Amino acid sequence: MATTATRLLRRLLGGALDVVFPPRCVGCDRWGAALCSSCRHGLPRLLPPFCARCSEPLAGPSAERGASLCVRCRDHPLAIDGIRSPYLMEGAIRRAILELKYQGVASLAVTLGRLLHDYLEAHPLPADVIVPLPLHSRRQRRRGFNQAALLAKEVGRLRHRPVGADLIVRVRNSPSQAQAATAEERRANVKGAFQVREGAALGGKRVLLVDDVCTTGATLDACARALKEAGAAEVWGLTVARER
């Protein structure tokens, strides 16, 4: 992990600091790349069977029956059209996300953004505009950046799609979803947390929501609900990783 001093410098200088402190691979700790090609090939992929709506890995009776939806999506239909994640939140991909999110290693946003682009090359999702999942302004000031915005910027650049970084805001600074013990608590925690900015031209648009991690999909779904109420025709979620 980066030292406290390096972390503070990264927040001030961003990617320029990678010239002074060259990146080390989060998988094997070798110098030269934030994620080396060898570790990239060994990343923990999210493979079928998984829920057709939220991508939760299916196991046990659900998998044996060939069910297309997890119990949660069957019992509580989502507003979002679907959520996709190329990887499981494990191993090197977990370390990469945590380094980006909490240590401010800017080069990882480019690396992870490219992984999302590669996934979309193989598994296209509709996207007239790419929107990062917003942080509450107070939390973003504390962190110094929004990791979802960094990822969305890179995906937009590679996919040649506009990025609507300010189309929607988080108006309620709800507690971290990690503090919610159940899916029901997570849904309640983010209910009404998002608001589309006045004048946002979303009528008939297909929106691709980008974030780093999906746990139950409650936050992405709450954001998608607000976007659809503002006129979006479709909203899909794309995250780097999915919790089991």
Image: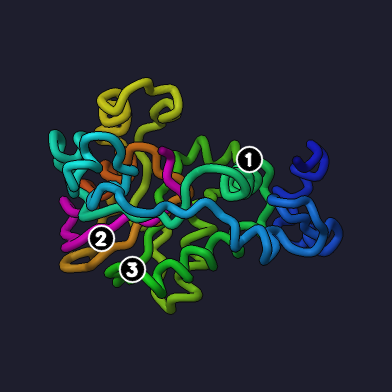
Residue 171, compared with residue 122, is above or below; it is above
Q: Mark 1 touching mark 3, by CB under 8 A?
A: no
**Of marks 1 and 3, the one in the foreground:** 1
> Among all residues in the image, which is located at the extreme bottom?
160
Q: Residues within 10 Å of mark 1 (few under 14, many from 20)?
A: few
User: Which of 94 and 227 lies nearest the eye of the viewer?
Assistant: 94
**Type of amino acid at the residue the image marks with label 3:** Val
Q: Is mark 1 on a helix, strand or loop?
A: helix
> Among all residues in the image, which is located at the extreme front?
64
Give the extent of the magenta segment.
228-244
The residue that mark 3 highlights is: 129
| Magenta run includes residue 1 | no
- The answer to whether 240 appears left or right of 229 in the picture is right
Q: Marks 1 and 3, Cα distance to the nearest angstrom? A: 27 Å
User: Going 16% across and 63% down the picture, which residue do you hit?
Assistant: 233
User: Going 75% across and 43% down the picture, which residue do you hit?
Assistant: 7
Q: State which quadrant residue 95 falls in.
A: top right
**Type of amino acid at the residue the image marks with label 1:** Tyr
* Quarter of the figure with the C terminus: top left
The residue that mark 1 highlights is: 102
Q: Earlier in the sequence, mark 3 or mark 2?
A: 3
User: Going 39% across and 28% down the picture, which residue do you hit?
Assistant: 174
| Magenta run includes residue 231 | yes
User: Residue 126 appears at what percent x and percent y?
Assistant: 27, 69
Q: Earlier in the sequence, mark 2 or mark 1?
A: 1
User: Residue 121 appears at what percent x and percent y?
Assistant: 41, 74
Q: Marks 3 and 2, Cα distance to the nearest angstrom? A: 16 Å
Q: Earlier in the sequence, mark 1 or mark 3?
A: 1
The residue that mark 2 highlights is: 199
Q: Marks 2 and 1, Cα distance to the nearest angstrom? A: 33 Å
